[in-house]
Image (spheres, helix red, strand yellow):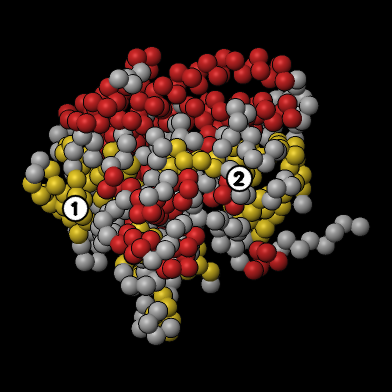
Amino acid sequence: MTDCDVLVIGSGPAGIAAATTAATYDLKVTILDEQGSAGGQIYRALENCSDDMANVLGEDYLYGKKLLNQLAQSGVKRIYNATVWAIDNEGCVTYSRHQTAHQIQAKQIIIATGALERSTPLPGWTLPGVMTAGAAQILLKSHQICIENAVLAGTGPLLYTIANQLIKAGCQPKAIIDTISTSHYLRAARFFPIASYTVVGKGLSYLRNIKKAGVPFYKGATDFRINGTNHTEAIQFDYKGQTHNIETDHVLLHQGVVPNTQLSRSLRLDHHWNNLQQCFQPTVDSWGVTSIPDIRIAGDGSGIGGALVAEMQGNIVALGAVTALDKITTTTRDNLAVPINRQLKSHARLRQFLDILYQPPAAVLRPTDDTIVCRCEEVTAGDIRSYAKIGCSGPNQTKAFGRCGMGPCQGRYCGLTVTQILAHENGLSQDEVGAYRIRSPIKPVTLAELASLDEIPEP
Amino acid sequence: MFKRLVNKKQFTFTFDGAQITAAEGESVAAAIIASGQYTFRKSTISQSERGPFCIMGACYECLVKHDGKTVQACMLLATPDMQITTVPVANVKTNKANSPND
């Protein structure tokens, strides 16, 4: 077992900012990431990005180079290919690396494990060939592999970003089927963030590029269905009162991102439902402190805000951690945080606008009966509704009723949908219904890995 | 279909005996789907075809067998002459494990 002052889990923007800030205060700081290099998902594989790929992926991605350089020069101990699978509430973090388990004892833990794409169940979504929009982006970033003739289905900034990247890469999408409707625009209009006009302008330029490339763009689509026998063959949807069918091998789904709460749930931290973003998030104070005093969360894992907000939060949370370690006074901490908090406030207004504009449709949150909700155990929305009728009041009972949530993904892709369906069927709020109880190990480990922890103590 | 945008050193490994071309740095999942194969395994209950979904180690759809262990193909770096096989699926009706060669 090794030890450190500050342990950061996740090397995306929040994790890098937190680790590098903490390191400037003469502290022993370690950062872990399960990927082979830093950057998280947003700045994934940025270190080796060629000039050609830089042109495809865009300046928002390249911005992350500054963070990678910061980390490289920081003196933070970096451990990659490290999958964290347990944390206890006394500061002990267990991770596996190349099939051997290790433990680190930390005075302050900062969880920065980010987000997952929102699960978007619809009939046929388990067919091979259906992936998330983020998956397509990872293939571009990490492997410079481009998906040709994909159909993008869903809504949100990432969908248009990946469409632009595919266009720039010479593999423009076959079509974009957007769930956004006029009512979304009308609802969002009064929250338009004038201060963030450059960001909005960039979004509009993405839409213009899509139009210029001649990619068919269907707005306000409903009733999606992916058809195929052994793999994806076509996507069907309703648009302007007519049913359309587009043949394709690849459908890329996206409806925004949600916090990855596996670690925070495994610690029994307090969470609450974010009604605007339609997801659970851990309850943290303004210094990222959770319901366990020495465990903090920064970045999208504590609430979706995007990459730039994550970086700012990383800095704030680190200030809190170094204060707790008596490196600075609370007064110094508060003064250092003032300019960052001012920026966070203006980003919050943009976030609110985006959240209202790109609200997922009810059909995505509570799919039709024949839709598989739990992919791992193949439990449908209809199954879950039938459990509710015979007394199932919460997600943990769905495990007993039908193994829902008990597969390898441990509720990462069904959890929110199960909560939504049960809340609706039982007339309860999502907070009242709750979420899956998650237990360590949060990723499967072998007995050999467990056994490798049994160190012979030093004399 | 998939297109590789950059020319990198290539090598091969096998997936259920079939040769798969991979480029340096690719995960097993990326190489297999780039070769045009999107089905990795059969699902537990209905034995339906499944393939990679998230490519970031969260969904567990891309499971394959390597070196006797079931692993996520998207988190496994492809190396020359690796031997990857499909995970066997237990037939939940008969409780008998099937291999894809049955």
**Three-letter amino acid code at disc 1?**
Ile
Q: Is residue A448 visible?
A: yes
The chain ID associated with circle 1 is A
Contact check, label 2 and label 1, Cβ < 8 Å:
no
Q: Which mark is residue B51?
A: none
Q: Which residue is mark 1?
A: A235
**Three-letter amino acid code at disc 2?**
Leu
Q: Secondary structure at mark 2?
A: loop
For this view, does A273 lie left or right of residue B2?
Answer: right
Please identify the residue farthest to the left as the structure is shown: A242
User: Hey, which quadrant is residue A443 in on the image?
Assistant: bottom right
Mark 2 residue crowding within 10 angstroms, few (<14) / some (14–19) / many (20+):
some
User: Hey, which quadrant is residue A171 in on the image?
Assistant: top left
Q: Nearer the viewer, mark 2 or mark 1?
A: 2
Tell me residue A363's x, y (percent). Answer: 27, 48
Q: Residue at x 38, y 14 (%)?
A: A195
Q: Secondary structure at mark 1?
A: strand
Q: Residue at x 31, y 67 (%)?
A: B49
Q: Nearer the viewer, residue A156 or A103?
A: A156
Q: Which residue is mark 2?
A: A269
Q: Residue at x 22, y 31 (%)?
A: A183
Q: Residue at x 38, y 45 (%)?
A: A118
